[in-house]
Image: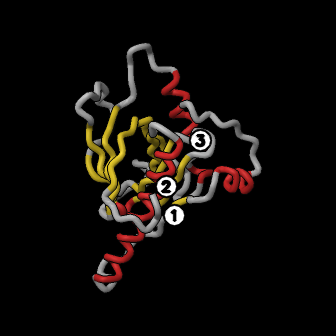
Amino acid sequence: MASDEQTPVTFVVQYLGKRDARGLWGIKYTRQPVDELVLEARSLKPGVTLPLLKLQVSSEGLTVREMPQNTNPNFEAGLFPIDSISYGVQDLVYTRVFAMIFLRDSPNVYEVHPFECHAFVCDARQSARSLTLALASAFQEFGKIVKKEGGKKKPNKFAIDLRSAEEIQAELRGNFTDHSNV
């Protein structure tokens, strides 16, 4: 998907789950949560599957719905508003995984951790890349809407990491093995 394509775009994904993130932007804040979620998914008992979901990306955000054949109720359905998503990336270790950092609305950050990393497994690396590009496009559309409205609603800052895995690895200077078959 080119970044100038319009949303909404729909993907069928498996939900790995969510973990607290220690910051708003950057793969360094999705790395540990994704590793933990993949490890947990790999330890599922035989016959237990990850939730099978329909993920729709639009200028309003990411809408999560259950697929008819889903057998696992462990997911959050509904809208993740675009102005509450601070970061999205195709994981560089598990290249079929798309991860995002979501800013949970919390009146007391000491009781409820405000940054959540949500991770989704796509059917292929290219699908994870397309999902990342779709979110980038949705952010562009959202920005245009905010401008059109004369800045009545000030958007939060966000980041989409569109660099290749090699570019991200060069920045992290880490020696990761590609585990794209989550």
Of the 4 image quadrants, the one containing the N terminus is: bottom left
Q: Is residue 74 above or below residue 106?
A: above
Name the N-terminal-most of marks 2 and 3: 3
Q: Work out how far the residue at label 3 is from the one at label 1, CA to CA, in angstroms.
A: 18 Å
**Are dots 1 and 2 in contact, CB under 8 Å?**
yes
Label 3 or label 1, whichever lies nearer to me, is 1
The type of residue carrying mark 2 is Gly
- Label 1: how many residues lie within 10 Å, few (<14), some (14-19) or many (20+)? some
Q: Is residue 126 above or below residue 87?
A: above
Q: Is residue 156 above or below residue 26?
A: below
Q: Work out how far the residue at label 2 is from the one at label 3, CA to CA, in angstroms.
A: 15 Å
In the foreground, 152 or 137? 137
Of the 4 image quadrants, the one containing the C terminus is: top right
Q: Position of residue 76 (x, y in %)?
A: 31, 41
The type of residue carrying mark 3 is Gln
Identified at 51% across, 61% down, the residue is 160
- Label 3: how many residues lie within 10 Å, few (<14), some (14-19) or many (20+)? some
Residue at the bottom extreme?
150
Q: Which residue is mark 1?
A: 159
The type of residue carrying mark 1 is Ala
Q: Is residue 37 left or right of residue 7?
A: right
Residue at the left extreme?
68
Q: Which residue is mark 2?
A: 88
Name the N-terminal-most of marks 3 and 1: 3
Q: Which residue is mark 3?
A: 32
Identified at 33% across, 49% down, the residue is 10
